[in-house]
């Protein structure tokens, strides 16, 4: 079967005019990740709701291109659009916060990270983003609390532990 592979972007382009096929592919991938992957040693953090719908692959590609080109307003608009279309996906709310932060909109970024945490309290990235934001603001107690949440969620991550220790050490 060599030479017969397709990238996920090629698959999307083949079925672009038929979103139902893409949804079926996405559903199948979610079943594989939720049921089959653990049996072969692949760990999934959450249920299939965590996975990004395959139909959003072009959005994700455009968003990363905008970020790479330092076009944070376009990236923010794309992230907000996806967040509105898929409000249960905390990853898009996280991306909105990241873009707001790049644009210097600190309070809006903080609210986005907090909203992402409410959507999925077990996802570590918004906790770390919020902790980093608090640290940059000099709000060390809040930063320590957020890093503590990250350590609780992912106790094996030494970076989160070091950040927490760094904040806790007297200067």
Image (tube, helix red, strand yellow):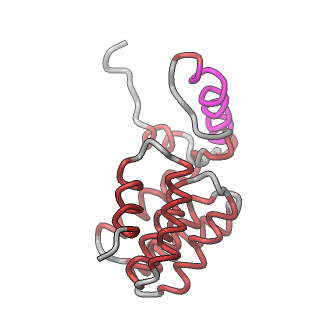
Vertical relation: 32 (above or below) 130: above
For the point 57% across and 45% down, which residue is it? 54
Residue 82 belongs to the span the image colors magenta: no
Residue 82: quadrant of the picture: bottom right
Q: Which is nearer the eye, 85 or 121?
A: 121
Quarter of the image that includes the C terminus: bottom left
Residue 52 x/y as whole percent: 58, 48
- Left or right of 19, for residue 65: left
Residue 65: quadrant of the picture: bottom left
Report the residue that reaches farthest toward the top.
Answer: 1
Q: Main secondary structure of the magenta part?
A: helix
Residue 108 x/y as whole percent: 55, 84
For the point 69% across and 64% down, which residue is it? 118
- Left or right of 129, for residue 25: right
For the point 41% across and 76% down, which residue is it? 135
Please report the bounds of the magenta region as a residue range.
Answer: 22-38
For the point 48% across and 55% down, which residue is it? 58
Q: Which is nearer the eye, 152 or 31?
A: 152
Looking at the image, how many numbered discs can be counted on the residues? Answer: 0
Vertical relation: 70 (above or below) 61: below
Quarter of the image that includes the N terminus: top left
Vertical relation: 149 (above or below) 69: above
Residue 31 x/y as whole percent: 67, 29
Vertical relation: 101 (above or below) 167: below
Residue 31 belongs to the span the image colors magenta: yes
Residue 170 x/y as whole percent: 34, 74
């Amino acid at each position: 079967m060599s030479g017969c592979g397709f990238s996920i972007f090629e698959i999307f382009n083949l079925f672009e005019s038929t979103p139902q096929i893409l949804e079926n592919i996405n559903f199948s991938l979610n079943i594989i990740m939720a049921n089959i992957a653990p049996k072969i040693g692949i760990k999934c953090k959450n249920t299939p709701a965590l996975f990004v719908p395959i139909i959003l692959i072009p959005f994700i590609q455009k968003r990363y291109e905008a970020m790479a080109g330092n076009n944070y307003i376009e990236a923010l608009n794309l992230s907000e659009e996806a967040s509105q279309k898929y409000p249960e996906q905390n990853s898009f709310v996280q991306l909105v916060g990241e873009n707001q932060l790049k644009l210097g909109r600190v309070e809006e970024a903080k609210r986005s990270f907090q909203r992402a945490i409410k959507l999925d309290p077990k996802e570590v990235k918004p906790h770390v983003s919020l902790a980093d934001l608090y640290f940059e603001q000099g709000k060390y107690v809040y930063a320590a609390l957020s890093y503590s949440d990250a350590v609780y969620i992912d106790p094996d991550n030494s970076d989160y532990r070091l950040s927490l220790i760094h904040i806790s050490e007297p200067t």
